[in-house]
Amino acid sequence: MSEPEEDFASMFEASFQATHYDKGQTVEGTIVGISPEVAFVNVGGKGEAVIGIEELKNDDGAVEVAVGDKIQAVVVSTEGGLTLSRRLARGGATDRQLEDAFHAGLPVEGKVEKAVKGGYEVRIARQRAFCPLSQIDTIRNMAPAEYEGHVYVFRIIEYKEGGRNLIVSRRAILEEEQRINAVEVRKSIVAGAVLTGRVTSVRDFGAFVDLGAGVQGLIHVSEMGWSRVSDTSQVVTPGEEVTVKVLRVDDDGRKIALGLKQLTDDPWSTVPERYEVGQVRTGRVTRLAQFGAFVELEPGIEALAHASTFSQAGRSDAWSRLVAVGTKGAFEILTIDLEKKRIGVSLLQDWASPAGADIDDMREYTERQDAPAAEAFGSLADKFRGVFKSREQ
Protein backbone atom coordinates (compact mmCIF):
# COMPACT_ATOMS: atom_id res chain seq x y z
CA MET A 1 0.00 0.00 0.00
CA SER A 2 1.41 3.41 -0.94
CA GLU A 3 1.87 6.22 1.60
CA PRO A 4 -1.17 8.27 0.43
CA GLU A 5 -3.33 5.18 0.72
CA GLU A 6 -1.98 4.51 4.22
CA ASP A 7 -2.73 8.13 5.20
CA PHE A 8 -6.27 7.85 3.86
CA ALA A 9 -6.82 4.53 5.67
CA SER A 10 -5.68 6.09 8.94
CA MET A 11 -7.92 9.14 8.46
CA PHE A 12 -10.84 6.95 7.44
CA GLU A 13 -10.55 4.74 10.52
CA ALA A 14 -10.12 7.76 12.81
CA SER A 15 -13.14 9.57 11.37
CA PHE A 16 -15.32 6.49 11.71
CA GLN A 17 -14.37 6.07 15.35
CA ALA A 18 -15.45 9.67 16.00
CA THR A 19 -18.94 9.19 14.54
CA HIS A 20 -21.39 6.38 15.25
CA TYR A 21 -23.28 4.82 12.33
CA ASP A 22 -25.75 1.95 12.34
CA LYS A 23 -26.14 -0.71 9.71
CA GLY A 24 -29.22 0.05 7.65
CA GLN A 25 -29.03 3.79 8.36
CA THR A 26 -29.65 6.05 5.37
CA VAL A 27 -27.02 8.79 5.05
CA GLU A 28 -26.41 11.69 2.71
CA GLY A 29 -22.91 12.55 1.60
CA THR A 30 -20.79 14.31 -0.99
CA ILE A 31 -18.52 12.54 -3.50
CA VAL A 32 -14.95 13.63 -2.69
CA GLY A 33 -13.00 11.19 -4.85
CA ILE A 34 -13.49 8.54 -7.54
CA SER A 35 -11.21 5.60 -8.31
CA PRO A 36 -11.64 2.72 -10.78
CA GLU A 37 -13.17 0.52 -8.06
CA VAL A 38 -14.72 2.76 -5.41
CA ALA A 39 -15.82 6.32 -4.74
CA PHE A 40 -15.10 8.14 -1.50
CA VAL A 41 -18.04 9.88 0.18
CA ASN A 42 -17.88 12.59 2.85
CA VAL A 43 -20.82 11.84 5.20
CA GLY A 44 -20.38 14.82 7.48
CA GLY A 45 -17.59 16.33 9.51
CA LYS A 46 -14.52 14.16 9.07
CA GLY A 47 -16.57 11.08 8.34
CA GLU A 48 -15.89 9.39 5.00
CA ALA A 49 -17.20 6.18 3.50
CA VAL A 50 -16.70 4.10 0.37
CA ILE A 51 -19.18 2.90 -2.22
CA GLY A 52 -18.56 0.50 -5.09
CA ILE A 53 -18.16 2.24 -8.45
CA GLU A 54 -20.59 -0.21 -10.07
CA GLU A 55 -23.33 1.25 -7.93
CA LEU A 56 -22.73 4.66 -9.47
CA LYS A 57 -23.10 3.61 -13.10
CA ASN A 58 -26.19 4.03 -15.25
CA ASP A 59 -27.74 1.40 -17.52
CA ASP A 60 -25.13 2.19 -20.21
CA GLY A 61 -22.26 1.49 -17.82
CA ALA A 62 -21.16 5.11 -17.47
CA VAL A 63 -20.47 6.66 -14.05
CA GLU A 64 -23.33 9.08 -13.47
CA VAL A 65 -21.82 11.11 -10.62
CA ALA A 66 -18.88 13.47 -10.29
CA VAL A 67 -16.80 14.90 -7.47
CA GLY A 68 -18.96 17.37 -5.57
CA ASP A 69 -22.25 15.59 -6.23
CA LYS A 70 -24.48 14.67 -3.29
CA ILE A 71 -25.89 11.15 -2.99
CA GLN A 72 -28.04 9.19 -0.57
CA ALA A 73 -27.09 5.65 0.36
CA VAL A 74 -27.60 2.98 2.99
CA VAL A 75 -24.91 1.80 5.42
CA VAL A 76 -24.39 -1.89 4.61
CA SER A 77 -21.25 -2.51 6.68
CA THR A 78 -19.42 -0.90 9.58
CA GLU A 79 -16.62 -3.43 9.84
CA GLY A 80 -13.19 -2.06 8.97
CA GLY A 81 -14.72 1.18 7.78
CA LEU A 82 -18.01 2.50 6.49
CA THR A 83 -19.41 0.87 3.33
CA LEU A 84 -22.45 2.22 1.54
CA SER A 85 -24.88 0.86 -1.02
CA ARG A 86 -26.79 3.23 -3.26
CA ARG A 87 -28.74 0.57 -5.11
CA LEU A 88 -30.48 -0.56 -1.97
CA ALA A 89 -31.41 3.03 -1.27
CA ARG A 90 -32.90 3.73 -4.69
CA GLY A 91 -34.49 0.33 -5.33
CA GLY A 92 -31.92 -0.99 -7.80
CA ALA A 93 -30.71 -3.96 -5.75
CA THR A 94 -29.75 -7.29 -7.28
CA ASP A 95 -31.32 -10.57 -6.16
CA ARG A 96 -28.23 -11.30 -4.07
CA GLN A 97 -28.36 -7.88 -2.44
CA LEU A 98 -32.03 -8.37 -1.62
CA GLU A 99 -31.22 -11.66 0.08
CA ASP A 100 -28.39 -10.00 2.00
CA ALA A 101 -30.76 -7.18 2.97
CA PHE A 102 -33.25 -9.73 4.30
CA HIS A 103 -30.69 -11.52 6.47
CA ALA A 104 -29.10 -8.27 7.69
CA GLY A 105 -32.44 -6.48 8.24
CA LEU A 106 -31.44 -3.65 5.88
CA PRO A 107 -34.12 -1.34 4.49
CA VAL A 108 -34.79 -1.24 0.74
CA GLU A 109 -36.72 1.20 -1.40
CA GLY A 110 -39.82 0.09 -3.23
CA LYS A 111 -42.65 1.65 -5.21
CA VAL A 112 -46.25 0.85 -4.35
CA GLU A 113 -47.75 -0.08 -7.71
CA LYS A 114 -51.31 -0.92 -6.76
CA ALA A 115 -53.65 -2.01 -3.99
CA VAL A 116 -54.59 -5.69 -4.13
CA LYS A 117 -56.65 -7.96 -1.93
CA GLY A 118 -55.27 -7.81 1.59
CA GLY A 119 -52.47 -5.36 0.83
CA TYR A 120 -50.28 -3.84 -1.86
CA GLU A 121 -48.09 -4.93 -4.76
CA VAL A 122 -44.68 -3.31 -4.38
CA ARG A 123 -41.89 -3.14 -7.01
CA ILE A 124 -38.40 -3.55 -5.54
CA ALA A 125 -35.73 -3.50 -8.24
CA ARG A 126 -36.81 -6.21 -10.72
CA GLN A 127 -38.83 -8.06 -8.10
CA ARG A 128 -42.46 -7.81 -7.08
CA ALA A 129 -43.19 -7.96 -3.38
CA PHE A 130 -46.32 -8.01 -1.26
CA CYS A 131 -46.96 -5.62 1.63
CA PRO A 132 -49.90 -6.63 3.89
CA LEU A 133 -52.44 -3.91 4.57
CA SER A 134 -51.46 -3.82 8.24
CA GLN A 135 -47.78 -3.27 7.36
CA ILE A 136 -48.07 -0.23 5.08
CA ASP A 137 -48.39 2.29 7.92
CA THR A 138 -48.64 2.67 11.68
CA ILE A 139 -52.26 3.82 11.40
CA ARG A 140 -55.27 2.42 9.64
CA ASN A 141 -56.00 4.43 6.50
CA MET A 142 -59.56 4.47 5.22
CA ALA A 143 -58.39 5.26 1.66
CA PRO A 144 -55.87 2.52 0.65
CA ALA A 145 -55.43 3.92 -2.87
CA GLU A 146 -53.62 6.96 -1.40
CA TYR A 147 -50.40 4.89 -1.15
CA GLU A 148 -50.36 3.91 -4.82
CA GLY A 149 -47.53 5.42 -6.86
CA HIS A 150 -45.45 6.41 -3.83
CA VAL A 151 -41.88 5.27 -3.13
CA TYR A 152 -41.23 4.17 0.45
CA VAL A 153 -38.52 2.39 2.44
CA PHE A 154 -39.43 -1.18 3.40
CA ARG A 155 -37.92 -4.03 5.38
CA ILE A 156 -38.03 -7.53 3.89
CA ILE A 157 -39.73 -9.71 6.53
CA GLU A 158 -40.03 -12.89 4.42
CA TYR A 159 -37.72 -14.12 1.64
CA LYS A 160 -38.86 -17.33 -0.07
CA GLU A 161 -38.37 -19.26 -3.31
CA GLY A 162 -35.10 -17.56 -4.09
CA GLY A 163 -36.59 -14.12 -3.86
CA ARG A 164 -39.64 -14.81 -6.00
CA ASN A 165 -41.84 -14.55 -2.94
CA LEU A 166 -41.08 -11.41 -0.95
CA ILE A 167 -43.14 -9.95 1.87
CA VAL A 168 -42.18 -6.47 3.03
CA SER A 169 -43.15 -4.09 5.81
CA ARG A 170 -43.04 -0.32 5.90
CA ARG A 171 -44.52 -0.28 9.38
CA ALA A 172 -41.41 -1.94 10.83
CA ILE A 173 -39.28 0.94 9.52
CA LEU A 174 -41.68 3.58 10.83
CA GLU A 175 -41.87 2.03 14.29
CA GLU A 176 -38.09 1.84 14.52
CA GLU A 177 -37.82 5.54 13.61
CA GLN A 178 -40.49 6.34 16.17
CA ARG A 179 -38.60 4.62 18.97
CA ILE A 180 -35.48 6.62 18.13
CA ASN A 181 -37.27 9.98 17.90
CA ALA A 182 -39.81 9.52 20.71
CA VAL A 183 -37.54 10.96 23.42
CA GLU A 184 -37.06 14.24 21.54
CA VAL A 185 -40.73 14.52 20.62
CA ARG A 186 -41.83 14.13 24.23
CA LYS A 187 -39.71 17.14 25.19
CA SER A 188 -41.92 19.39 23.05
CA ILE A 189 -45.18 18.10 24.55
CA VAL A 190 -45.96 20.37 27.49
CA ALA A 191 -49.23 21.76 28.81
CA GLY A 192 -50.33 24.73 26.74
CA ALA A 193 -48.39 23.78 23.61
CA VAL A 194 -50.22 23.88 20.26
CA LEU A 195 -49.12 20.97 18.05
CA THR A 196 -50.04 19.33 14.77
CA GLY A 197 -50.69 15.60 14.69
CA ARG A 198 -52.41 12.87 12.77
CA VAL A 199 -55.56 11.05 13.93
CA THR A 200 -54.78 7.35 14.37
CA SER A 201 -58.14 6.05 15.57
CA VAL A 202 -61.60 7.33 16.47
CA ARG A 203 -63.65 5.86 19.33
CA ASP A 204 -66.97 6.72 20.97
CA PHE A 205 -65.13 8.39 23.86
CA GLY A 206 -62.71 10.40 21.72
CA ALA A 207 -59.85 10.21 19.23
CA PHE A 208 -56.17 9.27 19.50
CA VAL A 209 -53.68 11.57 17.78
CA ASP A 210 -50.08 10.76 16.82
CA LEU A 211 -47.99 13.80 17.73
CA GLY A 212 -44.88 12.35 16.10
CA ALA A 213 -42.60 9.37 16.61
CA GLY A 214 -45.55 7.26 17.72
CA VAL A 215 -46.27 9.44 20.77
CA GLN A 216 -50.05 9.59 21.10
CA GLY A 217 -52.48 11.80 22.96
CA LEU A 218 -56.24 11.60 23.46
CA ILE A 219 -58.86 14.17 22.51
CA HIS A 220 -61.74 13.28 24.83
CA VAL A 221 -65.19 13.74 23.32
CA SER A 222 -65.86 16.53 25.82
CA GLU A 223 -62.90 18.49 24.42
CA MET A 224 -63.90 18.23 20.76
CA GLY A 225 -66.35 21.13 20.65
CA TRP A 226 -68.18 23.65 22.77
CA SER A 227 -71.44 21.95 21.76
CA ARG A 228 -72.17 18.41 22.91
CA VAL A 229 -70.66 15.91 20.45
CA SER A 230 -72.80 12.82 19.90
CA ASP A 231 -70.75 11.28 17.07
CA THR A 232 -66.96 11.65 17.25
CA SER A 233 -66.56 10.36 13.68
CA GLN A 234 -68.34 13.48 12.46
CA VAL A 235 -65.59 15.64 13.99
CA VAL A 236 -62.38 13.84 12.96
CA THR A 237 -61.44 10.85 10.81
CA PRO A 238 -58.44 8.44 10.86
CA GLY A 239 -55.49 9.81 8.91
CA GLU A 240 -56.68 13.42 9.18
CA GLU A 241 -54.14 16.06 10.19
CA VAL A 242 -55.34 18.17 13.12
CA THR A 243 -54.03 21.02 15.24
CA VAL A 244 -54.55 20.46 18.96
CA LYS A 245 -53.73 22.06 22.29
CA VAL A 246 -52.00 20.08 25.02
CA LEU A 247 -54.20 20.26 28.12
CA ARG A 248 -52.39 17.95 30.54
CA VAL A 249 -49.36 15.67 30.63
CA ASP A 250 -48.98 13.06 33.35
CA ASP A 251 -45.73 13.03 35.32
CA ASP A 252 -44.44 10.01 33.43
CA GLY A 253 -45.43 11.58 30.10
CA ARG A 254 -47.43 8.53 29.10
CA LYS A 255 -50.91 10.07 29.22
CA ILE A 256 -51.44 13.20 27.18
CA ALA A 257 -54.79 15.03 27.18
CA LEU A 258 -55.50 17.12 24.09
CA GLY A 259 -58.20 19.59 23.11
CA LEU A 260 -59.73 20.89 19.87
CA LYS A 261 -62.30 23.36 21.18
CA GLN A 262 -59.66 25.35 23.07
CA LEU A 263 -58.39 26.68 19.73
CA THR A 264 -61.74 28.36 19.02
CA ASP A 265 -63.57 31.12 20.89
CA ASP A 266 -65.55 30.06 23.95
CA PRO A 267 -69.18 31.15 23.33
CA TRP A 268 -69.55 31.69 27.10
CA SER A 269 -67.09 34.58 26.93
CA THR A 270 -69.78 36.84 25.45
CA VAL A 271 -72.73 35.60 27.55
CA PRO A 272 -72.60 38.61 29.95
CA GLU A 273 -73.16 41.00 27.04
CA ARG A 274 -75.84 38.97 25.29
CA TYR A 275 -77.87 37.21 27.99
CA GLU A 276 -79.85 38.52 30.96
CA VAL A 277 -82.47 37.26 33.38
CA GLY A 278 -85.98 37.72 32.02
CA GLN A 279 -84.97 37.33 28.39
CA VAL A 280 -86.90 34.89 26.24
CA ARG A 281 -84.90 32.88 23.73
CA THR A 282 -85.64 30.05 21.36
CA GLY A 283 -84.04 26.74 22.25
CA ARG A 284 -84.02 23.05 21.45
CA VAL A 285 -84.24 20.19 23.96
CA THR A 286 -81.12 18.03 23.53
CA ARG A 287 -81.60 15.46 26.31
CA LEU A 288 -83.79 14.59 29.26
CA ALA A 289 -82.80 13.72 32.82
CA GLN A 290 -84.80 12.85 35.91
CA PHE A 291 -84.41 16.39 37.22
CA GLY A 292 -85.19 18.27 34.02
CA ALA A 293 -84.45 18.95 30.36
CA PHE A 294 -81.23 20.26 28.84
CA VAL A 295 -81.79 22.96 26.25
CA GLU A 296 -79.38 24.25 23.61
CA LEU A 297 -79.85 28.01 23.23
CA GLU A 298 -77.04 28.25 20.67
CA PRO A 299 -74.00 26.13 19.77
CA GLY A 300 -71.96 25.79 22.95
CA ILE A 301 -74.56 27.36 25.26
CA GLU A 302 -76.70 24.81 27.07
CA ALA A 303 -79.30 25.60 29.73
CA LEU A 304 -81.39 23.52 32.14
CA ALA A 305 -85.16 23.63 32.42
CA HIS A 306 -85.65 22.08 35.87
CA ALA A 307 -88.57 19.70 36.31
CA SER A 308 -90.08 22.07 38.91
CA THR A 309 -90.56 24.75 36.26
CA PHE A 310 -93.06 22.69 34.29
CA SER A 311 -96.79 23.12 35.00
CA GLN A 312 -97.26 19.40 35.66
CA ALA A 313 -94.09 18.96 37.69
CA GLY A 314 -96.02 17.85 40.77
CA ARG A 315 -97.44 14.81 39.03
CA SER A 316 -94.50 12.40 39.17
CA ASP A 317 -92.75 12.48 35.79
CA ALA A 318 -95.76 13.89 33.94
CA TRP A 319 -93.71 16.96 33.05
CA SER A 320 -91.48 14.87 30.76
CA ARG A 321 -94.47 14.20 28.52
CA LEU A 322 -94.60 17.90 27.72
CA VAL A 323 -91.30 17.78 25.88
CA ALA A 324 -89.16 15.35 23.93
CA VAL A 325 -85.63 15.45 22.58
CA GLY A 326 -85.74 17.74 19.56
CA THR A 327 -88.57 19.89 20.95
CA LYS A 328 -88.15 23.53 19.98
CA GLY A 329 -89.72 26.28 22.03
CA ALA A 330 -89.44 29.64 23.72
CA PHE A 331 -87.61 29.64 27.06
CA GLU A 332 -87.44 32.39 29.63
CA ILE A 333 -84.07 32.84 31.35
CA LEU A 334 -84.48 32.52 35.13
CA THR A 335 -80.86 32.43 36.39
CA ILE A 336 -77.33 32.90 35.03
CA ASP A 337 -74.25 31.57 36.86
CA LEU A 338 -71.21 32.70 34.86
CA GLU A 339 -68.68 31.05 37.18
CA LYS A 340 -70.22 27.59 36.84
CA LYS A 341 -71.41 28.25 33.27
CA ARG A 342 -75.02 27.43 34.11
CA ILE A 343 -78.24 28.97 32.87
CA GLY A 344 -81.64 28.10 34.29
CA VAL A 345 -84.66 28.44 32.00
CA SER A 346 -88.38 27.80 31.98
CA LEU A 347 -90.38 26.62 28.99
CA LEU A 348 -93.19 28.92 27.97
CA GLN A 349 -95.75 26.13 27.70
CA ASP A 350 -97.84 27.46 24.84
CA TRP A 351 -94.72 27.72 22.73
CA ALA A 352 -93.46 24.12 22.78
CA SER A 353 -93.24 22.77 19.24
CA PRO A 354 -91.64 19.36 18.55
CA ALA A 355 -92.06 19.91 14.83
CA GLY A 356 -90.63 23.41 14.98
CA ALA A 357 -93.73 24.83 13.27
CA ASP A 358 -93.88 27.93 15.48
CA ILE A 359 -90.26 29.00 15.11
CA ASP A 360 -91.17 32.04 13.00
CA ASP A 361 -93.70 33.14 15.61
CA MET A 362 -91.13 32.65 18.35
CA ARG A 363 -88.64 34.74 16.42
CA GLU A 364 -91.26 37.47 16.09
CA TYR A 365 -91.90 37.24 19.80
CA THR A 366 -88.23 37.49 20.79
CA GLU A 367 -87.82 40.49 18.49
CA ARG A 368 -90.64 42.17 20.34
CA GLN A 369 -88.83 41.39 23.59
CA ASP A 370 -85.90 43.46 22.38
CA ALA A 371 -88.12 46.47 21.44
CA PRO A 372 -87.92 49.67 23.56
CA ALA A 373 -89.88 49.57 26.79
CA ALA A 374 -92.42 52.11 25.51
CA GLU A 375 -93.35 49.80 22.66
CA ALA A 376 -93.29 46.57 24.67
CA PHE A 377 -96.25 44.89 26.41
CA GLY A 378 -96.49 45.03 30.15
CA SER A 379 -96.43 41.39 31.14
CA LEU A 380 -95.76 37.98 29.66
CA ALA A 381 -99.50 37.37 29.52
CA ASP A 382 -100.07 40.60 27.62
CA LYS A 383 -97.31 39.71 25.21
CA PHE A 384 -98.83 36.33 24.43
CA ARG A 385 -102.26 37.88 23.91
CA GLY A 386 -100.78 40.30 21.43
CA VAL A 387 -98.98 37.54 19.54
CA PHE A 388 -102.06 35.29 19.43
CA LYS A 389 -104.18 38.20 18.12
CA SER A 390 -101.70 38.79 15.33
CA ARG A 391 -101.83 35.08 14.44
CA GLU A 392 -105.64 35.13 14.27
CA GLN A 393 -105.75 38.06 11.87
Image (spheres, rainbow, N blue to C red):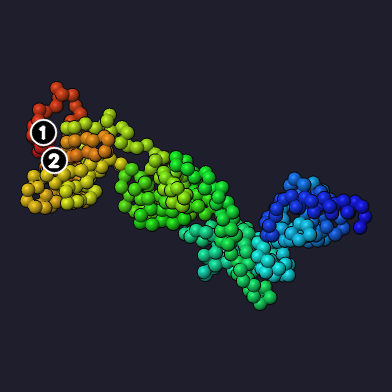
Image location of residue 326, percent across then percent down: 22, 49
Disc 1 target residue? 380
| 24 relative to 292, above or below | below
Q: Do residues under tags 1 and 2 come within 8 Å of each other at their CB atoms?
A: yes
| 290 relative to 87, above or below | above
Q: Which residue appears at 44% of the width and 51% of the height?
A: 255
Where, by quadrant of the figure, is residue 273 drawn?
top left
- Distance CA(mark 1)–CA(mark 2): 10 Å
Residue that sits furthest to the top in the current view: 374
Q: Amino acid at mark 1?
A: Leu
Residue 348, which numbered label? 2
Total labels drawn: 2
Where, by quadrant of the figure, is residue 367 drawn?
top left
In the rendered image, which quarter contains the C terminus?
Answer: top left
Please tell me whether mark 1 sits on a helix, a strand or a loop: helix
Towards the viewer: 147 or 180 = 180
Q: Which residue appears at 9% of the width and 47% of the height?
A: 313
Left or right: residue 344 versus residue 35 is left
Left or right: residue 43 versus residue 362 is right
Image location of residue 61, percent across then percent down: 82, 61
Mark found first going from the N terminus, 1 or 2: 2
Regarding residue 273, the answer to whether it shows in the image is yes
Where, by quadrant of the figure, is residue 163 drawn?
bottom right
Towards the viewer: 121 or 300 = 300
Crowding at dot 1, Cα within 10 Å, few <14 / some 14-19 / many 20+, comes out as: few
Q: Which residue appears at 46% of the width and 52% of the height?
A: 254
Please tell me whether mark 2 sits on a helix, a strand or a loop: loop
Q: Amino acid at mark 2?
A: Leu
Image location of residue 377, percent across then percent down: 11, 28
Q: Which residue appears at 78% of the width and 54% of the height?
A: 49
